[in-house]
Each structure stands twice: as C-alpha cells, then as structure tokens.
Image (tube, rainbow, N blue to C red):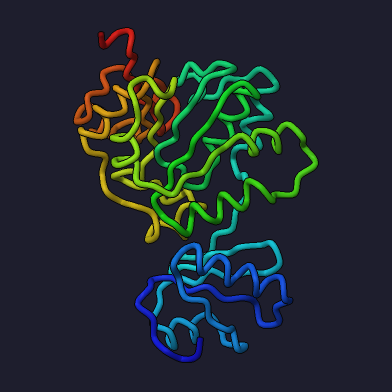
Amino acid sequence: MTGTRVMNRTIVTTTHKPDADSVLLGRQAASLLNLVYVDRQRLSLEKLREKYGCENILVIKNDQLTLYTQMGEYFFHPSMSVPRIKAIKQGKTDHMVEAMQLQPGDTVLDCTLGLGADAIVAAFVSGPAGRVTGLESSPEIAYIVSKGLIGYSDNRPLLKEAMSRINVINDNYNSYLAKQQDNSFDIVYFDPMFRFPRHKSSSMEPLREVVNPAPIELAAINHAVRVARKLVVLKENWFSEEFERLGFKKISGGRYSPIAFGIIDKKESR
C-alpha cells in the first residue's frame, strides 16, 4: 500500500530491511486481523503514523512481533509467570493459585487473558490433564500472545509445555460466556483493567489504550457462575468497590499486598 490514509487504529509493517519471511508474516497478520499492511519505506514510526493516520503499529521482524502504541511497545514475554512458577516449584504460595484452589486436571477459563502470565501459571499448575482457555477481546494482543505462546524460545521444558496448553480465543467474555453450557469449566477467572490502575505495572502501560477498559457487568458474573463448576475468581485492588458491586463476598489476600481476589464458591452459593 502507498500513502493512503487508513481507518484502522493499527497498521502492520516490517523493519527497515525485512527478509521475505517477515513480509509474508506481515501480510498474513494483516489479513487475519483485518488490518492494512504497508511497506516500511525506511520511515520512522512517527512518520508512519503521520502518513497513514494510525495510532498503533505492529512491526514484524523475523518471528518477533512488536506492537508500538502511543504509550510504548509490547512484545510477548512470559514475564512474571517465570518467577511465580519457580516459587511454586519451591513449595511457596501463589495467591492466584490459592484463590482458585487450583488442582491438577482443572479446567480454567481466563476471561481477560491480557499478557498471558496468569494463564501460563494456571496451565502449569493444572498440568497435562488440565486445560486453560484465554479470552482476549483485542485482536492485536490475542494474535501476539497466541504466536508468542507457540514460538517462544526457552530451555525450560515445563514452561514450554504449560504455554502449549493454553488456547487463545479472540472474543469478548460477555458473548463467549453467554454461549457456554452450564458447568463448562472448573474455574472462571477475571483480571480486568483496574478501576484505579497501578501505574508501577509498566508492562501494561503500552497496552492501556488497546485493551478493553469497560468495567465488568453483573450479567457477565451471573453467566460465569453458571458456567463454572467450582469457583469464579476476580482479581482487583484490595480496596476496590468492584467486589461488593459484583457480589463477591469472600475476599482472599490484600493484607500484605495491594492485590486481592474475590471468590464466589459454587458450593456455598447453592
């Protein structure tokens, strides 16, 4: 494509000197995401934004996908899942795993996949007999994470195996939950954008304008309770009013951490 301005918030391009595989992957990504692929023409990111009228730029370099937003850049990395899994292997407590009461063989629906760290930890703990499905409403993030989970190079086989057990779906949790049968998953999990963001969480900042900022609706929680066999878990700031608004009466964590987990136990709600 030449200098035509585009309506998409995101365009796809390559580095200044791409190889043939990068161009092919870029065109495939643009087609799959219904975005516009443009030739880089040695232009800077700012020049590309000016020329095509876009906000975000997905840059392909070999197998590396990097999303550049106005707030920074993001590429897939297992991030905090690595030290968390290491701690779990050492017998230490993981607050999310504890709140989920997660066991080997459990099935987990992560309704807000985001960067995927929680899903990776859940996949590790639930093991080969378990299943983790991650929903991500942003097409760009879902694409980057799904490709990253498959292609991430690492010499830790247990981490790679856990990543391979995550099924990424580009969908909104409202519509997805409404279509699921009763008791489809053991645990349904929400980690939405906090109403009061923790800006020290720098890994999320580049994506703040890309992810869905809408608060969770009570209807989604009602569907989640129907879909879950065991628990519905919500991650939020410990002082958040979302727990009360959405009917989470049992709260785990928060005493020594700014993060807490609201829990709805199906056994107790019957």
Q: Identify whether 179 is placed above or below 225.
A: below
Q: Residue at x 65, y 30 (%)?
A: 85
Q: Identify whether 16 is placed above or below 133.
A: below
Q: Quadrant of the C terminus?
A: top left
Q: Position of residue 235 (x, y in %)?
A: 38, 32
Q: Quadrant of residue 180?
A: top left
Q: Residue at x 71, y 82 (%)?
A: 17
Task: Residue lying at the far right in this picture: please name it.
Answer: 155
State left or right for residue 118 relative to residue 136: right
Q: Position of residue 131 (x, y in %)?
A: 55, 28
Q: Position of residue 147 (x, y in %)?
A: 61, 53
Q: Position of residue 127 (x, y in %)?
A: 63, 23
State left or right for residue 167 relative to residue 241: right
| Nearer-the-camera pick, 230 or 204 | 230
Q: Identify whether 232 is placed above or below 216.
A: above
Count the marks: how many? 0
State left or right for residue 12 relative to residue 180: right
Q: Residue at x 45, y 70 (%)?
A: 35
Q: Residue at x 39, y 17 (%)?
A: 229
State left or right for residue 7 relative to residue 200: left
Q: Quadrant of residue 184?
A: top left
